[in-house]
Image (cartoon, grey):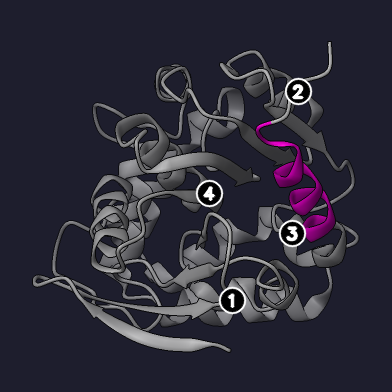
Amino acid sequence: MERPCFADLGDITLFYTDHGEGGTPLLLVHGWGADSQEWVWHLPALSADRRVIAVDLRGHGYSTAPESGNNPRRMAGDLVRLCALLDIPRVVAVGHSMGAVIVSLLAAEHPELVEAVVTVEPGYGYTGFVAENMPGMIQALRKGDTGAIAVQIDEWSYGAASPDWLRLWHARRLRATPPHVLIEAFEALFGGDEPIGLRPHSDELLRRRACPVLTFWFDPAQADWERSLFKHPQSRAVVWEGSGHRLHEERPAEFVSVVTRWLKTLGRAPRS
């Protein structure tokens, strides 16, 4: 049964729902300008035989939006505190886009907490033309109608197979996210002195993940790049060409199937 709750962490309150029981809990982490509703298609199947926590990050959904500190590193710290509050010693951390950066930070900086990581179309590893355009996007978010600019930026997330409802759903979520949260989080990923969403900073982060990693990409080149940084023999990269950035929402049943089959292999000897 779903158990909705608000976790009081002192400086902020996080909304989360708690589903299922058994196994190492899954911690589901949404992307930029979204919320935990992103996982509604996956929760019933994922929670059939294990506990699953789906959380709204600070500044998103029903969680508190502080005036500052809305960046991936602080968000990762919030999740550490949430797990401690819930008395959860180990998780399999699952993250989409910015959420993939956050769960990778958890794996790198709190390895005692993270048994394995699943990243979905991660918000890291950008290079070339995309990376070169990030400063302009940050300036546009700061100087223009932030919500409208965020929706424009989000347009790259969709492909020919992406349903119209998915575009509308996420456009409304972006519009509902406080502008300062969108700006802070985006700039922390792709601007400043240490943009962890861009290479080579992303390389440095991923090399610190020692646990098994399952990653999903629509771009084979990005998958090859991340595969080269794996540290664990049971890590795996999956490529779904033709899908969009929200491939887990476009193909939820297939996504759940791949994740659950991979989780069952953990702890077994890898194939030679």
The residue positioned 46% from the left and 80% from the top of the image is 17
- The Cα–Cα distance between marks 1 and 2, rounded to whole angstroms, is 36 Å
Would you identify the image quadrant in which residue 253 lies?
A: bottom right
Foreground: disc 1 or disc 3: 1
From this view, report whether residue 171 is shown above or below residue 268.
Answer: below
Kind of residue at badge 3 = His
Foreground: disc 1 or disc 4: 1
Q: Do the residues labelled 2 and 4 touch (CB within 8 Å)?
A: no
Magenta stretch: give its range.
255-267
- The Cα–Cα distance between marks 2 and 4, rounded to whole angstroms, is 26 Å
Q: Are marks 4 and 3 in contact (CB under 8 Å)?
A: no
Kind of residue at badge 1 = Gly
- The Cα–Cα distance between marks 1 and 3, rounded to whole angstroms, is 20 Å
The residue positioned 84% from the left and 73% from the top of the image is 163
Label 4 belongs to which residue?
92
Q: Give the numbered dot on residue 221.
A: 2
Give 103 or 131, whichever is nearer the viewer: 103
| Sequence-earlier tag: 1 or 2 | 1
Q: Give the numbered dot on residue 248.
A: 3
| Sequence-earlier tag: 1 or 4 | 1
Mark 2 element type: helix
| Sequence-earlier tag: 2 or 3 | 2
Foreground: disc 4 or disc 3: 4
Q: Does the magenta stretch include residue 258?
A: yes
